[in-house]
Amino acid sequence: MNQFNNSEIIFANIEGNNLAPGLKGVMYLYPYNGGSLVEIEVVNMPKDSSHPYALHIHEGNSCGGKDFEESMGHYNPTNQPHPMHAGDLPPLFSNDGYSYMTVYTNRFTPKDVIGRTVIIHSGMDDFKTQPSGNSGSKMACGVITQLKNNQSSL
């Protein structure tokens, strides 16, 4: 495994909206093998375990606007169809409101997505509907930024 220093670690603090008002999370992105090792931990997710929750990196640089509309659409610098967008990630599962996942992707490096947003959707991604997998409303958002002096937390 690579050794990381703080200047290489990218993160996002994630917060829910009215669909998940207590939701909080943190995502770390580490440079690894020409791509990114993505680690995400979320608490106070909906306790509905009947479906997973879509997770995507979005183009926008803000979680502003009604229902995070300033986060825009999926991060897709090579103009691929869904689910081949660079920002398409595996779904999160709610385990009594808690979720943790680590995944590797070679579709982007951490530095590629600084200033973008991470979105957790209210539904599951069907991995086929264009342009975004029919994954429901945006229920949580975080802006991806450079780690500075332990500023990330749940």
Image (cartoon, helix red, strand yellow):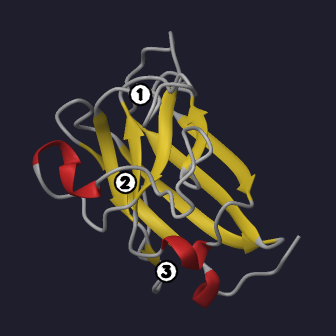
Identified at 38% across, 34% down, the residue is: 121
The answer to whether 18 appears left or right of 38 in the picture is left
Q: CA distance from mark 3 to mark 2?
A: 14 Å
Q: Secondary structure at mark 2?
A: strand
Query: Percent from the top left, x then y, of residue 113?
Result: 50, 70
Q: CA distance from mark 1 to mark 3?
A: 29 Å
Q: CA distance from mark 2 to mark 1?
A: 18 Å
Point out which mark residue 14 bears: 2
Note whether 138 is above or below 58 in the view shown. Answer: above
1 or 3: tag closer to the N-terminus: 1
Residue type beneath disc 2:
Ile
Point out which mark residue 153 bears: none
Query: Percent from the top left, x then y, of residue 55?
Result: 50, 41
Residue type beneath disc 1:
Ser
The answer to whether 19 appears left or right of 50 in the picture is left
Quadrant for the C terminus in the image: bottom left
Note whether 112 is above or below 44 in the view shown. Answer: below
